[in-house]
Image (cartoon, rainbow, N blue to C red):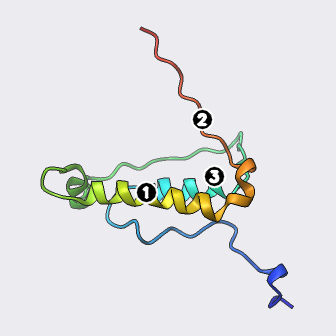
Amino acid sequence: NNNNNNNKILPVAPYYDERFYGYGKNKISLISHLRKSAYKFRILPEGFIVHNPHPESLTKQTWNDREHHSLHGEMDALYQMFVKELDVMYDSVRDKIVPLCKRPQRQL
């Protein structure tokens, strides 16, 4: 019986948060959600990804034009709030969160 709260069927990964619209933070928010939920990442030694560049969209131009548009600032503020929500939501697995990669120090 899947109606019992102890036997919930949950998605393998979280859905994109639809509050992130237009351009920016949607993929970052998904990775943050996976990290905070203690998702287990794996390295695929034979795997690869290909990025197919595409022309810059009008939405990306809006994102980059902070002088005339608020989209970038709105998504930045929403992302900070989103991360705080995740901290509360996944407090019980806080000790299992995947750490961020350390940035190498620049040599002067």
Residue 79 disc label? 1
Residue situated furthest right in the rendering: 1
Q: Disc 1 or 3, which lies upstream in sequence? A: 3
Q: Amino acid at mark 1?
A: Tyr
In this picture, residue 74 sits left or right of residue 48: left
Numbered label tally: 3
Q: Are marks 2 and 1 in contact (CB under 8 Å)?
A: no
Report crowding for label 3: few under 14, some 14 to 19, many 20 or more residues within 10 A (C-alpha). Answer: many
Tell me where residue 33 sits by quadrant: bottom right
Q: State the image quarter where residue 68 is shown.
A: bottom left
Amino acid residing under circle 3: Arg
Name the image quarter holding the C terminus.
top left
Location of mark 3 (residue): 35
Mark 1 crowd level (few <14, some 14–19, many ≥20, 10 Å Cα): many
Residue 39 pos. (x, y %): 70, 55
- Real-space CA distance between mark 1 and mark 3, rounded to the nearest whole angstrom: 14 Å
Give above or below for 105 relative to 23. above
Residue matched to label 2: 101
Coordinates of residue 31 in the picture (x, y in percent): 56, 54
Q: Please tell me whether residue 71 is drawn above or below residue 2 in the rendered image.
A: above
Q: Residue at x 14, y 50 (%)?
A: 67
